[in-house]
Image (cartoon, grey):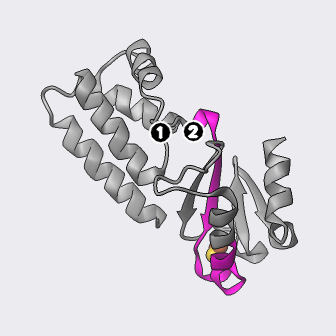
Amino acid sequence: MNHDLQKEQLDEIFTYYSGQKDRHTQEMVVALLREIQEVQGCVDGKAREKVLEITGVGEGFLKTILRLHPSIKEAANLHEIIACTGEWCGKKNGMEILSNLRKELGIAKDGISRDGQFCLRTQNCLKQCKTSPNLMIDGVLYSGEKLKNLKKLLDEVRG
Ligand code: FES
């Protein structure tokens, strides 16, 4: 999904929940977390902070909810991959790399890999076009030749 669109959808969700009177209830917090996960594949630290701010619940309460709902993935436990879907990377096999990545990891609809270790999302240009094609994994940029052997790269990341 395009990053701007993702941001727009998240803003819409946040605005909606901010206006709900019962937003501090467990039911609403879970619904909010699920909606975030649907948009960005996981609930990362930044999103968790936003949830605390919007709902006004305590950190302990949120942690308990996350523990009770293992299907809600926290990015903290996952390697985050951001694949570039921008024009320059597109010209250099970016889309092929993305589809190979999806296949290799068995990425489900929610963006989570089969082994539960990776969360994949896309961004329209990582602002590093010179080195395209590009991928960002856990905040580190991987480019060009390095992306020829995805299996090896992913094994490296797994450690
Ligand atoms: S198009 Fe991929 S980094 Fe700009």
Left or right, 86 with respect to 132, comes to: left
- Label 1 sits on residue: 43
> Along the polypeptide, which appears first: circle 2 or circle 1?
1
Disc 2 crowd rating (10 Å Cα; few below 14, some 14-19, many 20+) is many
Q: Quadrant of residue 50?
A: top left
Circle 2: residue type: Ala
The answer to whether residue 127 shows anywhere in this view is yes
CA gap between label 2 and label 1 equals 6 Å
Residue drawn at (78%, 73%), measured in percent from left and top?
Answer: 131
Answer whether labels 2 and 1 touch (C-beta < 8 Å): yes
Q: Position of residue 55 (x, y in %)?
A: 28, 26
Q: Magenta segment range?
A: 75-97
Instruction: Please provide percent x and percent y for residue 58.
Output: 37, 15
Secondary element type, mark 1: loop
Residue 135 is left or right of residue 38, and the answer is: right
- Position of residue 95 measured from the top left corner of the image (x, y, whole percent): 62, 77
Mark sitting on residue 75: 2
